[in-house]
Structure formats: structure tokens, C-alpha cells
Amino acid sequence: MRLLRVGTLFVVFCIAISLGCKEDPMGRARAAHATERADEAEAALKEVLAQSPKDFEARRLMADVHRFRGQFEKTEAELEALWKEKGFADDTKEFPPQERAYRDLLENQFNELYSRWSTALDPAKEPDKFEKVVHAGLVWNKKSATLNRILVDHYLARADALQQEGKKLEAAAAYDQVLQLRAMPAQRKDAQAEADSLRKAVFVDEINAKFAAMKAELATAGQWDEESKTLTFVVEFPVSKRLKQKKEADLATARKEATGAIRSTIATWVAKVTGLAPELAAMTAPAVGSGDEKLGGGKYAVSVSMKLEDVIEAAYVVKLKADAAAKKAAADAANPTDPPADTEEPPAGTNAGAAPAGTTGTE
């Protein structure tokens, strides 16, 4: 009899629990949500929303129902609507504990959404959409190891493919993207090196292509030696007629007086060969070898030679510096700051930016 009563009570308890669950649509919704049973969760949540259309929890769980079905755009729209309604976009606003808990729940849902969404996409077939989704996920969690890793792998693969196609600058840009992510130190180092190498290769290719059209004319004029890959030209400069070839002191004086003309001529040639603007070409300092010197009759003449590879290397270094300066200037313009209050103007009659005496300012 005792066993019968216990059994009866157990059956009654089970029935009561069953009836209670059926009468509690939110309970059924949570149970179905926990195991990602989309249809059951949706049916239960619709019951809740029919009674309370603005129920936060029901709407939050319904967003996941769309995710279970792979309807990621719909999930994103629902979560963004809830985020906006709650005012969570305002970082300066203080929220009570319950609201902070809601915010944490939504953040977790955003993270899960973009994690699932990114793995559902094929980066080879939909690269733009894949990048957009992963970047959106990193907005919510920039430290996500998973999202950073798959995006780094994507950009590395993309850079490699672009190199295979001969698209060097596009490949360099892909490597640049790796540097913006939380990549492994070795990956960042390699990406930086590859990007630099590719950009330099493009610069060298462009100059060689430009120079190829000049070779014949320069060779005819005796200004280009194909075997040594050297440019040679003569610089002439007027000096005092009292300076003589046989006196070493006079030659030293003539060389010093002609320094500006030599530098100017070199800059002109560098600009001609590389296409650099004259003011940038003037900043180059390639290895220069002086040949025969002639002094007399009020004229100093010297032959100057430059290895083409030295010209290109110097031009590339100057270009990098100019690009960095332009980038900094743009950043400063976008974020202007007032000059220090104690900054003073240089005294009248001075030139604060002038080169030290005895220098040309182009060292």
C-alpha cells in the first residue's frame, strides 16, 4: 500500500510538472533554446510575445532562433534593434545592475553570432562578405583569438594568391591588414617584411622600365655603361682664374666651391631617372665616385659616376621618408593640437631652420 501511494504521488508529480511546463511557454522556450531546437523554441516564444510583444527576454531568444537556422542577417538586425532600444550604444551612460546584465547577454550573443557566421562563409567564394562579418565581430571582441586567427589566415592566403597573379601592391596591402590584427609575432614580422619587399620591387620595376627607354641615348652620349650599370656625367663650375690644376690646395678650393653645383646636378639626374620630385631628389645621397678633374681658365670640371642601383636605393629611402611624413601630416591635421604655450618665435634676423655653417642642408 505504501509503495502504491509513493508511485501514485510520483505519477501525480510528473503530470503536474508536465502541465506546468505546458502552461509556461518561456520555460519551454528556454529548454528548446538550450538544445537549439529552433521550431519548438519559436513556437513557445510566439506565445510569450503574443501576450507581451516587447518582452526583452523573448525577443532576445528569438534572435538566436534565427541564428540556429543560419539566418544571420536577421539575427544581427534583431540584436542591433535591442541594443539600440536599451541605449547601450551610449558608453558614457551608467546602467543599473539588471540592465548591465542584459547588455552582457547581448554582447555574448553578438560574439556567438559573428563566430558562427564567419565559419559558415567560404572566404574564397565570398571574400568581401567574409571580411565584413569578421571585422564586425572584432568590433564586439577585438581580442577574439578565433576571429583574429581566421582573418590573419585569410589575409595571408590572399596575399599569396595575389603574388602568384603578379599583383604586388595588392598583395602588400593584404599583408598590411595582418599588421592591424592580433597576429603571432613571427607572422607580423614576416608580413611587414613581405609588404616592404613587394612595394620596393614595384618601385624598382617602375624605374627600370622608365630607364630602359633612356639607355640608348645615354650610351650614345657616353653617359651610360651597360656592363657596370653606371651613369657618368660631367659637372662644370666657374671658379677664379688664379686656381691652377697642379696645385692641390687650388683643387681643394675648386671642389669646395663646386659642391653645390655637383649636388644640384646629381639631384637633376636622380629626378630624371627615378621620377622623384626635384625637392625629394635633392635629398638623395647615393654613392658617388669622382673621376677626372680639370681646373684652369676659370673653370673646374669633374666627371661624376653613379651606380644605377645606388640611385634607386637612395630614391626609395627618400620616398619612404616622404610617405611617412605625409602620413604623419595627415594624422596631425585630423587631430590638431595647440602648440605649447611657452613656444617662442626665434629672434628677428635669425633662421631657426638653417643648416649649420659649412653644410649644404642636404646631408
Image (spheres, rainbow, N blue to C red):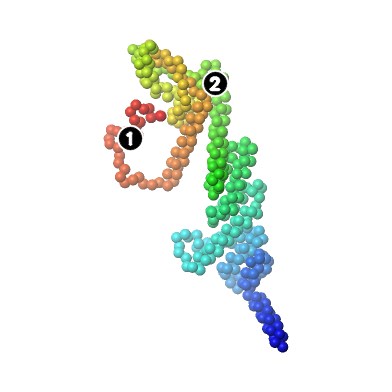
Q: Is residue 117 above or below residue 216?
A: below
* Residue at the farthest bottom position: 1
* Disc on res. 200: none
Q: Earlier in the sequence, mark 1 or mark 2?
A: 2
Name the quarter where the C terminus is drawn.
Answer: top left
Side (left or right) of 24 relative to 4: left
Residue 170 higher or lower than 207, as above or below:
below
Q: Secondary structure at mark 1?
A: loop
Image position of 89 (left or right of 146): left
Front-most of 344 and 146? 146
Crowding at mark 1 (Cα within 10 Å: few <14, some 14-19, many 20+):
few
Relative to 317, residue 107 above or below: below
Residue 169 picture location, percent across and down = 57, 38
Q: Which residue is mark 1?
A: 352
Tag 1: residue type? Ala
Give percent across and percent down for residue 241: 35, 12
Which residue is at 49% across, 68% downward?
97
Q: Secondary structure at mark 2?
A: loop
Q: What residue sits right under mark 2 in the picture?
A: 228
Q: Residue at x 47, y 27 (%)?
A: 286
Residue 251 pos. (x, y %): 38, 16
